[in-house]
Amino acid sequence: MAAEIGQYSLILAFLIALVETAACLVGAGRRDRALMALGRAAAFLQLAFVGTAFLALAFCYLNNDFSVALVAEHSNTTQPAIYRFAATWGSHEGSMLLWVLILSLYSAALAFFGTRLRETLQARVLGVQSFVASAFLGFSLFTSNPFIRLDPPPIDGAELNPLLQDPGLVFHPPVLYLGYVGFSMAFAFAIAALIEGRVDAGWARWIRPWVLGSWIFLTIGIAAGSWWAYYTLGWGGWWFWDPVENVSLMPWLMGTALLHSSLVLERRGALVSWTILLAILTFSLSLVGTFLVRSGVISSVHAFAVDPQRGVYILAIIAVATGTALAMFAWRVPQMRSGAMFQAVSREGGITLNNLFLIVLTATVFVGTFYSVFIRGGQGISVGAPYYRLTFIPLAIPLLLLVSFGPMLNWKRSDAGEVIWRLRWAIAAALFLLGIGTLILGVSRAGAVAGIVLGLFLIFGALAMLASRWRIGKDSRTSFAQRVWSTPLPVWGLALAHAGLGITTIGITAVTAFQTNKVIQMLPGQAVDLAGDRVTLDSVATVQGPNYQADRAFFNVESSFGTRELVSERRFYPVSQTQMTKAGIGVGFFGNTYISVGDRANDGSIVVRMWDHPFVDWIWVGAMFMAFGGMISLSDRRVRVGAARKAENLAGAAALS
Amino acid sequence: MNRALALIPVGLFVALIVTFYFALGRDPTKIPSVLINKPLPAFSLPGVEAGTPGLRSSDVRGQPMLLNVFGSWCISCVQEHPMLMELAHEGVVIDGIDWRDEAIDGAKWLNQNGNPYARVGNDRTGRTGIDLGVTGAPETFVVDAKGRVRYKQIGPIDADTWNNTIAPLLRKLRSES
């Protein structure tokens, strides 16, 4: 029954999305208020029906309805309830449903919160949104229907890939999709601006919070995925340059560029066409990611089951969405005035440079990811880390160096010498640490020292930015506490995000340069030294989990900070006949001890792989700082309601000439 | 903004979509290699660990065998690895080139995952890879007894390519020699 309700809801949602597209776009064109109101109502209805379809599928999973093919393929009676629920989006069909659900959520949010937005602009944005929604609902219905029945139904289902049976699955995909799909909002705003042939103050104020929100979700989602890979894949890697990871990184890089350029647009009314282009490209990269994971163009460790027919459908969606958008861009933008002017050395100039770097970085990842497609087919070959070490890293370093200078620049025109002077303490501290570090660790480690100092420089830069705002050491009519108290929230957000980037840089450099590992066959009672710690294998027990058996090894790790117990498991899932490791990780401020165990030999010994990962957690902590900085910035009242102040002067500036 | 400039994105995009479209229908196993029926180019590579023998092009002959290009950084190689272990177990001779990789990383990787290779050479700079026309890892060359390349597999060897392409070819080459 639930499956039928879901199926009908999906069909209704598809039809409603079509009606919504027509009502919104025609209504806005004719300034027909009744039609536009119909469009808004349709946005809520669409959410209701997609939500119903999603809940129906989740219900089938939770109730072990194996007559639904999807449930039979990805779930099992022994699977814990939380993973039966999360399995709803653990397959291609289900994840598409989640994708559309989140898209509908964003549309409904705009219909609900967008009452202060100009009505025709709101209608056009909703129209574009529902067009994308109808394309993907059609995709779901015609090529990957989640509700197909099996006759006769099997007694029990197959199993969700054990790698996916993890809290990571509950959390990571929804958050990631909230980021990915959120960029559709920026895309829809861009198309609306191109239809209208102008960008006004309301547009500039409204696009930024959506971009910022999506960026926050994407940051958290990518970090969560990386952490998940770190603790489940059993060898402590945290980033693999795998195509599927890359397709989440590309919208993030492009979205970061968009975030900065939309700031310039909001504050100064400059970079109009640039922001529109970035908005189109960012969401297009999200679409390309969806295409890549589901088309079989590239093989990857976590691609879904592939089907060329689905690939063609998604490619058609991309061709229509991005193709139309770029064609409109080429047609409309030459008629739009580019807005306020600025000099090369200025905040705007700095952000333009930041954008160029981010775009080139995105391009290197793009080429690396699709390399095998470009060289006349070679499925499953990868250029891997050596390629990115040669292209991505050398381009990322100058960008990271520039980050601290950007916020010190004045809008419109600035003086390079003055900026360097304002950063003198940060620069001096960084150079001093670089010298000391190289002296202590030797010239051969200079690269690693430089990487860590670069991270520290980002943190110093953020502090220097706050210090110069508070005018430390200068007289002022206001007290120091008052100046700290009156610091605008977006400034706090900026400082946190840039410092977070520094923390991540330190983590990446330290773990890459200084990690050590040991592989050893151990008997219970045996001890071994690892990076100054003493690791003892206490005992190995055989345990029975809800849907797996495991060898559970208990370790004792003695370090200068005390002793602690680590548990590492080798699990066997009989239903799918797969093995997986659950690493024992001792998390610490200065680094992690990471232990994974292999097969047990006849003499009771067990293969133990152990790593010392210095500062590795800083990678994710830094990402959380970035996301938190974004949230603080977003919580600023002026961003949220977009109080008409600065942006007012924009109104005329960018109108059709 | 200049109209010609504004046309660049849409132009690039059309080219991209066309490429993707043709990538969808393509059989990735059909790739011509200029080396087919030619002897392997000469190379001499050091081993991945001190004390282990390296790999020379003159080693790869005498019987039909495989020359597999891998790297510790390569994800698809991890996916392919169990297959190679099984083949080595069945007696297929496989030589390996640890491509664009630090020798120490290659050695660690083999220690962790098992070593299916008769000999392994480390091609740190990727120079030999260029001579061999390696486009990415993993790739596998089927070499006959006289040291001539007879087939090149791009991407991992799976059960399908093994059963339908490589195993029959090896059988044929064994009966030739």
Image (cartoon, rainbow, N blue to C red):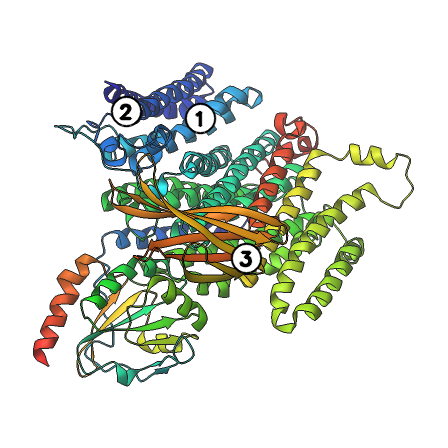
Q: State which chain disc 2 sits on.
A: A
Of all chains, the one bearing label 3 is: A
Mark 2: few/some/many CA within 10 Å (<14, 14-19, 20+): many
Tell me whether marks 3 and 1 sit on the same chain.
Answer: yes
Residue at image location 66% in from the left, 56% down from the top = A402
Residue nearest the observer in this picture, A426 or A39: A426
Q: Amino acid at mark 1?
A: Leu
Tell me: A347 left or right of A617: right
A575 horizontally vs A558: left or right: left
- Nearest the camera: B161 or A27? B161
Residue placed most toward the observer, A334 or A60: A60
Q: Position of residue B70 (x, y in %)?
A: 34, 67
For marks 3 and 1, give the one nearer the viewer.
3
| Disc 3 target residue | A534
Quarter of the rendering occupied by the C terminus of chain A: top right
CA gap, disc 3 and disc 1: 52 Å
Q: Position of residue A155 (x, y in %)?
A: 17, 29
Q: Amino acid at mark 2?
A: Cys
Select label 3 or label 2 by which is in front: 3
Quadrant holding the N terminus of chain A: top left
Query: What residue lies at 44% left-to-right and 14% top-to-bottom?
Result: A34
Residue at x 34% of width, y 47% of height: A580
x, y percent for residue A167: 43, 36
Residue A19 falls left or right of residue A259: left
| Label 3–label 1 contact, CB within 8 A | no
- Could you say which is closer to the camera, residue A371 or residue B64? B64
Can you identify the residue that label 1 sits on?
A105
Q: Check disc 2 and report the residue beneath it.
A: A60
Q: Mark 3 or mark 2, which has the lower sequence index? A: 2
